[in-house]
Image: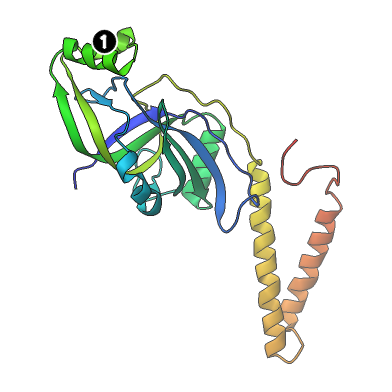
Amino acid sequence: MDCEYKELPFGSVAVRAAGDGEGSVLGEFSGLASAFYCVDDSWWPDVVAPGAFAQDLPEFLVEGFVSGVNHNWDCPIGRPLEVAETGEGLQVRASVSDTTHGRDVMTLLRDGVVRSLSIGFRALGWEWLETLDEVEAWWKAAGYSPTAADRAKAVGGVRLVQRIRLYEFGPVAVPANRRAKISDVRGAPLAVVAGERVLADVRAWVERAKRVRELRGGALPVGRFGEARVLRGELDALAGVVDPRVDVCGFE
């Protein structure tokens, strides 16, 4: 399958704290996945027309996914939650799953290291605007005021993409369009996420110990009893250093 990619900066990023959702969702991000009208930095310059995504978005919302950094299809990080065309382009909101790669990506987003989005798609409809004059005429009819960079990239003409089948979008390191930047990053510190995971492990251990006790008629094996006593002592010590004034969700 021939798949194309377009890289664009996030319009915004919002990271949701662990425990604020359900299941194994680590957080969320939102942003502008594709911008209309402007000329991108592809090998063949493309302009995406308004309406290009609309016909196939319902299917994408069900079947699509969020790729790992730089279109890593082997390590998808989440799923789309909202996709919609706006006057500016394709606005998206996605969840990030609590996986190793998902946690790494959230760190990069939170630190402002990765600031861009890219789409993986197939162009199903397009026309070639062969000259700058043709591109200028389309921009004028669309009510778009091109930048000097747009004009420079459109000197040899552009491909006007009119229908897109979207397969995925995801964060990338190198954008094709640098106009938009990250405007907001919010969420719990990674230490809080790690703490939730530790508590889940402790709960799982306790449940396993209960099952062992039931199987043995109410008594734990000697080794397990010793482990339980050590664990209780460590948890009691940990409780002694918890500051009750701190919001455990990590928000101010």
Where residue 131 appears, as percent x and y from the top left, is: 14, 13
Q: What is the image's colouring?
A: rainbow
Residue 104 drawn above or below residue 237: above
Q: Amino acid at mark 1?
A: Arg
Q: Residue furthest front?
A: 141
Dividing the picture into quadrants, the one containing residue 72 is top left
Number of numbered discs overlaid on the protein picture: 1
Q: Is 210 placed left or right of 24 in the picture? A: right
Dividing the picture into quadrants, the one containing residue 141 is top left
Question: Toward the viewer: 138 or 37?
Answer: 138
Q: Residue at x 18, y 11 (%)?
A: 132
Where residue 223 appears, as percent x and y from the top left, is: 72, 79
Where residue 233 appears, as percent x and y from the top left, is: 82, 64
Dividing the picture into quadrants, the one containing residue 171 is top left
Q: How many neighbours does mark 1 have within 10 angstroms: few (below 14), some (14-19), or many (20 or more)?
A: some
Where residue 204 appears, as percent x and y from the top left, is: 65, 69
| Residue for badge 1 | 151
Residue 163 drawn above or below residue 193: above
Residue 212 drawn above or below residue 172: below
Q: Residue at x 40, y 20 (%)?
A: 178
Q: Residue furthest left?
A: 130
Residue 141 drawn above or below residue 184: above
Q: Quadrant of the C terminus?
A: top right
Q: Residue furthest bottom?
A: 217
Question: Toward the viewer: 83 or 250?
Answer: 83
Q: Residue at x 48, y 44 (%)?
A: 94
For numbered disc 1, what is the local secondary structure?
helix
Q: Is 174 placed left or right of 26 in the picture? A: left
Q: Residue at x 84, y 49 (%)?
A: 241
Question: Toward the viewer: 95 or 125?
Answer: 125
